[in-house]
Image (cartoon, rainbow, N blue to C red):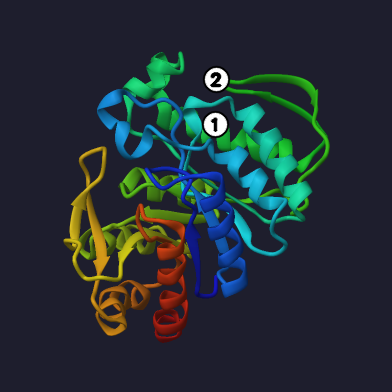
Amino acid sequence: MKGAAGVCLPNYGNNSSREAIVEVAKAAEELGYDSVWTTDHILLPSSHSYPYGKIYESLTTLSYVAALTDNVKLGTSILVLPMRNAVTVAKMLASLDSLSGGRVIAGVAVGWSEQEFKNLGVGHLFKKRGRLLNEQIKVMRLIWRGSRVSFKGHFHEIEDGVSDPRPKQLNGPSVWIGGNSEYAVKRALELGDAWHFTGITLEELDERLRLISQRGGKLPVTGRFTVDLTGKAPRESRAASGARRVVISGRDAQEVINQLTPYVDRGVSYLVCSFGDKPSQRQINDMKRFINDIIPSLF
């Protein structure tokens, strides 16, 4: 996978709106970004009302953006697949890929909020979500490959199902496995087309890369980062799940390049950038600076 960069759409947070989503998506395509990405939650508890209480549904948003763009890829970073019906999601992604001309990247992961699973009526699946996701990926790929489908597993039983249209991409969208854990890397090696971390520390990344090397894998490594071009943000934060997250924060291009270069040198070939919860024009200004002043020094 060659080096490339994508942009997180403002589909969540205080500044999310139809207008902001459209403006950022169109700007990403005009500026030459490879992709745009949505973040996924549906009904988190009120303790996480910010930033995820206001959130446009991930696949609906991408479908809307697909009709307003021509070339930019459409990705989920990430879709919490185990709290959704995999057959329905496979149909939605196949439809989106067909309608968009083959532009979908399906980033999926297990999720972290047990209460959100309960809110969706699937709380009983939370502790089984790793096994469930493994089977869901197999089911989706099977549906994407052929119009007639039969499958019997632990969670799914499909008898002579029919699913058309097929995705535009041969064998369906690329599946990127999200998560920073060893389990995520093992899942990506076995079932995915790439591993997609979020703000992982270099120490953790080195551990995961050793695991990939030990298993003889040639797995594309992609990463999502929060990028602050004012230099005011702390260089580490905590995710809603409580996990450590690296923040790329620098007052000038060289500071940002210095922080990202160790990741690229280790083989991270694709950067998905979140420029924070801010008005769309400020985000677009950051996007311009990043692609013009930073990306050329990384790839």
Q: Which mark is residue 155?
A: 2
Residue 53 percent across, percent down from the top left? 37, 32
Q: Residues within 10 Å of mark 2 (few under 14, many from 20)?
A: few
Residue at the location (59% across, 43% down)?
61
Query: Where in the figure is residue 204, as x and y percent of width and height?
Result: 23, 58
Residue under pointer 1: 135
Front-lying residue, 255 or 230: 230
Q: CA distance from mark 2 to mark 1?
A: 7 Å
Q: Secondary structure at mark 1?
A: helix
Q: Residue at x 24, y 74 (%)?
A: 250
Q: Is residue 272 visible?
A: no
At label 2, which amino acid type do we have?
Phe
Name the image quarter holding the N terminus.
bottom right
In the displayed structure, 222 sits above or below 172; it is below
Name which residue type carries label 1: Glu
Which dot marks residue 261?
Answer: none
Q: Quadrant of residue 32?
A: bottom right
